[in-house]
Image (cartoon, grey):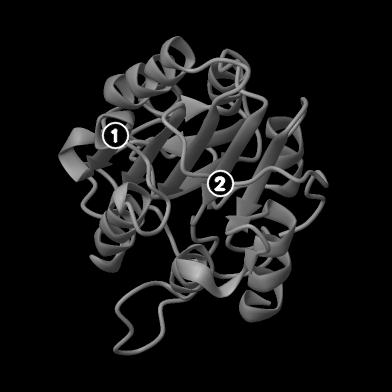
Amino acid sequence: MKNLTPVTTTISVISSAHALVVGIANYQKIKGLPETVLKDARDIYELLINPQHCGYLPDNVQLLLDTEATQTALLQALAKLAERSNQNSTVFIYISSHGGQLKSGSYAGEYLLPVDTDFTSEALLAQTAISGTQFTEALRAIPSQKLVVVFDCCHSGGIGQPKDADAAEIKAGLSESYYDVLKQGRGRVILASSRSTEQSYILPDAANSLFTQHLLDGLKGEVIAPGGVIRILDLFSYLQPKVI
């Protein structure tokens, strides 16, 4: 995690707070992720709508797990955030899934991988995933000036190999340059569980992934500032030494 925009945004208990929570473990056509990914997303969702903690209205928080998290559903959910929020809204997006990079070829770039991603070929990957350009445009359409996007995406392990022998290899994870583009704009912060050269961990017998467990702890009160608010820089300062 690095290069975060220094802001004093708070995740506060307000009716104009909106969120999207995504967890994908059981991919349809590429290698899956541990079931812990789904628990991470559920726990983040439950914490957000808990009136004793984040206090988001349940109707303002959308949870997409596994089969619900298709390319179409994810793009529609992002568009819904853009429609329902305004400049004064707080928007929180949490994504635990595969991310990947095609390092060369006509479709080179970063991609978020929905549950229905098909990596039979580079062309199919580009058609069924969400490109960096698509995701950036979706975020820019959200008018909120208090936007936090959290990625708990592993940068290790294989996603699978295309059947097309000439297709480029896809590298797991997303690059720092990708995160830098996403955070451009006022009041926008990206938190990532690991750098592109690092791994995201789930410790043996742990209920949650390492990063998300500390994120949950922070949001539950480990970094509450005077006045009962949680400032994003305080959350970052709490998380960073625990996951490096």
In the image, 104 versus 153, the foreground residue is: 153
Foreground mark, 2 or 1, reads 2
In the image, 89 versus 193, the foreground residue is: 89
- Secondary structure beneath dot 2 equals loop
Q: Which mark is residue 170?
A: none
Could you tell me which quadrant the N terminus lies in? bottom right
Give amino acid for label 1.
Answer: Gln
* Residue drawn where x is 47% and y is 72% of the image: 217
Q: Residue extending furthest front?
A: 227
Q: Position of residue 75 (x, y in %)?
A: 38, 20
The local crowd at label 2, few if under 14, some if 14 to 19, many if 20 or more residues have their Cα within 10 Å, is: many
Query: Which residue is under mark 2?
Result: 11
Q: Which of the 4 quarters of the picture holds residue 89?
A: top right
Give amino acid for label 2.
Answer: Ile
The local crowd at label 1, few if under 14, some if 14 to 19, many if 20 or more residues have their Cα within 10 Å, is: some
* Residue drawn where x is 41% and y is 77% of the image: 202
* Residue drawn where x is 62% and y is 30% of the image: 108
Relative to residue 137, is residue 56 drawn left or right? left
Q: Position of residue 57 (x, y in %)?
A: 31, 36
Sequence order check: which comes first, mark 2 or mark 1? 2
Q: Position of residue 19 (x, y in %)?
A: 41, 35
In the image, 149 versus 55, the foreground residue is: 55
Could you tell me which quadrant the C terminus lies in? bottom right
Can residue 199 be spotted in the picture? yes
Relative to residue 228, is residue 42 drawn left or right? left
* Residue drawn where x is 16% and y is 38% of the image: 67
Query: Which residue is under mark 1?
Result: 62
Report, in whole angstroms, how far the alpha carbon at label 2 lies from the one at label 1.
17 Å
Can residue 170 be spotted in the picture? no
